[in-house]
């Protein structure tokens, strides 16, 4: 262990410290400048001007742990949410088809799940309007810390692990949905798990709305026609989409060029600043609760009662959602089983907190009971 007094003599003589150092305090040479260690500036409880601890990852379900809808979906051709929560597919005009799976993995330390995309129908004749992306959408009130559209706007660092069956050039995109502005960076994949780290420039143009609407999207372009690839690639540059989208996917390969193609993704993290910190793991319970703000599988519900007036009397009760949803959701009922004398089963009083399933009888003195699976969707 080297004492501070010995260190002072050593460094004063132009020496190099190759031993452990024990000190009580490291002081700034110039007040307010912080202390630089291995090129990182530590100042006022932060690293590089940003927080050391606390909630860092803006992404929900970045470790791909939660899949409420299903663990696998096949023959996908349209946009939407299919398996892993918060991971949205955008697919348009292409003949390509694929399977999306929440896959258990054992070959990436610290991660047990990934989203896997497997091409099942190729499309090598690419029309101008074709596109294929996987994205995650973020509410405006959850990205105010980016300070976008101000003179204090922050850099944004995206990190993720990806593994593919062959080397691809894909595009990572930040999309300011409020102001129609995008910033893109290419990256090259590998057949082994690789952590990609991309730092995006701060944007002093266009503030993000402070509300529960769609304001910001992080995504990956894996297939595109000339409407999206025909422009000029300007790496890490914020650009307006007012006149064209042709710069969003310039130079990328195509996920649909072969049915051998596989893409695996996990460990997606987006944080403020220019430093990619280790992935922020959260408990399964915490991730599930965050996902349930957007989609909730309420399970099977049972309604029972007794009716006296034909078609008018009903029975029901509230279904309380496990967390406050982003907005009043769209309710879907499936696998209904009428065990009584129902003529109608409806969902009333829908809010971001709850809904009320109600069954109505079809005759005097008829019992009412009904089983049904209920899901609530408030995705953006």
Image (spheres, rainbow, N blue to C red):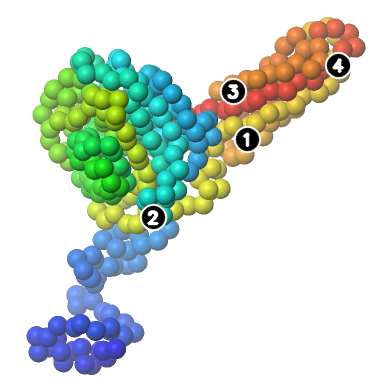
**How far separated are the C-alphas under marks 4 and 2?**
56 Å
Q: Nearer the viewer, residue 3 or 160?
A: 160
Labels 2, 1: front one: 2
Q: Residue at x 18, y 89 (%)?
A: 8
List x then y, in percent, for residue 84.
46, 35
Residue 71 visible in the current orientation:
yes
Residue 231, by quadrant, is top left
Measuring from the top left, give residue 23's x and y in whole percent: 31, 85
* Proximity of marks 1 and 4: CB atoms separated by less than 8 Å: no
Residue sitting at x 12%, y 35%:
234
In the displayed structure image, the side of residue 377 where residue 184 appears, left or right: left
C-alpha separation, residue under disc 1 versus residue under disc 4: 27 Å
Element at label 1? loop
The residue under the point 21% across, 92% down is 6
Looking at the rendered image, the disc whose residue lies closer to the viewer, 4 or 3, is 4
Label 4 Cα neighbours within 10 Å, binned few <14 / some 14-19 / many ≥20 = many
Q: Which mark is residue 109?
A: 2
Q: Choose mark 1 or mark 4, whichever is in front.
A: 4
Label 4 vs 2, first from the N-terminus: 2
| Residue 1 location, quadrant | bottom left
- Dot placed on the residue nearer the N-terminal end, 3 or 2: 2
Nearer-N-terminus badge (2/1): 2
Residue that numbered label 4 is attached to: 367
In the picture, the quarter occupied by the C terminus is: top left
Q: Is residue 167 left or right of residue 306?
A: left
- Foreground mark, 3 or 2, reads 2
**Mark 1 lies on residue:** 321
Q: Dots 2 and 1: beta carbons under 8 Å?
A: no
Which residue in the structure is indicated by mark 3?
A: 331
How many angstroms separate mark 4 from mark 3 (CA)? Answer: 25 Å
């Amino acid at each position: 262990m080297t004492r501070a007094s010995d260190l002072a003599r050593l460094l004063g003589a132009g020496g190099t410290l190759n031993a452990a150092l024990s000190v009580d305090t490291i002081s700034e040479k110039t007040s307010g400048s912080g202390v630089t260690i291995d090129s990182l500036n530590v100042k006022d409880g932060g690293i590089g001007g940003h927080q050391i601890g606390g909630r860092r990852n803006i992404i929900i379900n970045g470790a791909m742990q939660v899949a409420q809808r299903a663990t696998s979906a096949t023959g996908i051709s349209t946009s939407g949410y299919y398996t892993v929560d918060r991971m949205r597919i955008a697919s348009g005009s292409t003949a390509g088809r694929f399977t999306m799976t929440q896959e258990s993995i054992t070959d990436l330390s610290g991660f047990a799940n990934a989203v896997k995309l497997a091409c099942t129908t190729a499309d090598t004749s690419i029309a101008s309007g074709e596109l294929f992306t996987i994205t995650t959408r973020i509410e405006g009130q959850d990205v105010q810390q980016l300070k976008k559209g101000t003179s204090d706007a922050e850099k944004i660092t995206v990190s993720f692990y990806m593994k593919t069956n062959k080397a691809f050039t894909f595009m990572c995109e930040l999309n300011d949905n409020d102001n129609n502005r995008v910033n893109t960076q290419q990256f090259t994949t590998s057949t082994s798990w690789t952590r990609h780290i991309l730092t995006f420039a701060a944007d002093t143009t266009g503030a993000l709305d402070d509300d529960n609407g769609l304001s910001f999207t992080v995504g990956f372009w894996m297939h595109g026609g000339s409407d999206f690839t025909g422009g000029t690639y300007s790496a890490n540059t914020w650009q307006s989409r007012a006149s064209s989208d042709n710069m969003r996917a310039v130079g990328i390969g195509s996920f649909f060029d072969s049915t051998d193609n596989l893409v695996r993704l996990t460990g997606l993290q987006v944080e403020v600043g220019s430093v990619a910190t280790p992935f922020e793991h959260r408990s399964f319970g915490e991730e599930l609760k965050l996902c349930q703000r957007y989609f909730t599988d309420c399970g099977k519900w049972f309604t029972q009662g007794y009716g006296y007036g034909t078609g008018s009397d009903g029975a029901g009760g509230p279904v309380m959602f496990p967390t406050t949803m982003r907005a009043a959701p769209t309710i879907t009922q499936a696998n209904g089983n009428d065990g009584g004398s129902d003529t109608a089963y409806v969902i009333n009083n829908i809010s971001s907190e709850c809904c009320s399933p109600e069954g109505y009888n079809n005759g005097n003195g008829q019992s009412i009971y009904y089983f049904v699976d209920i899901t609530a969707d408030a995705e953006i």
